[in-house]
Image (spheres, rainbow, N blue to C red):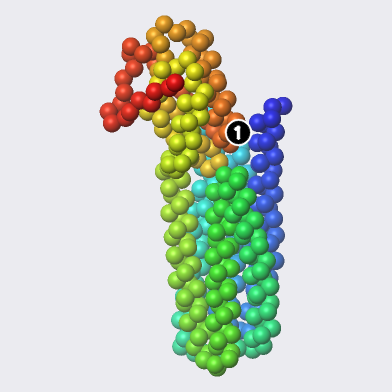
Amino acid sequence: MSAVTTVSKTSKQKVATLAAWSIVIALAVLALKTLAWWITGSVALYSDALESIVNVIASGAALYAIRLSHKPADQDHPFGHHKAEYFSAVLEGVLIVVAALLILVAAWRALQVPVTLDQPWTGLAVNGFASAINAIWALVLIRNGRSERSPALVADGHHIMTDVFTSVGVIAGLIGAVVTGWTILDPALAIVVAVNILWQGWKVIGSSVGGLMDMAVDKDEHMRIRDLISTNCKGALEVHDLKTRIAGRATFIEFHLIVDGDMTVRESHVICDRIEDALKAEIPSVRVTIHVEPEDEAKLPKGTTAVPFA
């Protein structure tokens, strides 16, 4: 078994394990936040608990999408299943929006009939503990999601971190409500939470749609790819029409490689293999397509510039 295959399997297991643990942690946090709401009767804490229900559903969808995205290419999906994670992230964004709308309904009702909070300090302590768990786990998901090129894990981590920020705001506001006796602060905070959740949901959806639309790598990564090709192209003359796109963990690269017209197929194949090996060694899950052209028949696409090689 090659080192690349071993690393790929290890990465797959790591991402799937993190996704599975997300469900367990989301259920634990949901239980704690529901307890905090039950103790206090706070509509703001209710909104916090409601978002945790979304976390549970989203974590389950992320686990399914991650397992699907790691399936090898088949006859119906010859380029693989890498984009499956983007659909999970879009679903999570939609669920966030639904949760925000439900919170707005509950907050509006509470504005009509403000409720005095029961055992507020106990409820706030329970909610604070749940938020601390969320904060730690969100950082774990975001860090590992980026390193493993997993959109589903990154989206889940950002969603949970949004939950942390809103929870901190809710806790701070409810402390103010308890101290001042202004019960209207409770539903008002819930509305602020809902608006923030709507914004975060919109960002998650927008980011995922960008991935589904075959977004190119960023400028720095593009230059790194160009440098790798340039460093390992001895024997070729120039390259043009370099294109990239990202699909989940996979990066697709294609370009035209210009060689001397008298070069044999075997010689040009050796150059292509050298470039592909260099790219695969530096970029996880890369897919490379190289179109070899003889110098006398090479035609530059309009608006592109050939890159000479030393």
Of 99 and 211, which appears nearest the observer?
211
Residue drawn 41% across the image and 6% down it: 262
Query: x, y (%) of residue 224?
Result: 49, 35
Q: Quadrant of residue 309?
A: top left
Residue drawn 54% across the image and 15% down it: 270
| 307 horizontally vs 107: left or right | left
| 13 horizontally vs 71: left or right | right
Residue drawn 60% across the image and 46% down it: 147
Q: Quadrant of the N terminus?
A: top right
Q: Quadrant of residue 277?
A: top right
Looking at numbered disc 1 in the image, what kind of residue is underneath it? Pro
Q: Residues within 10 Å of mark 1 (few under 14, many from 20)?
A: few
Of 76 and 229, which appears nearest the observer?
229
Residue position marked by numbered label 1 in the rendering: 72
Q: Quadrant of the C terminus?
A: top left
Farthest residue toward the front? 310
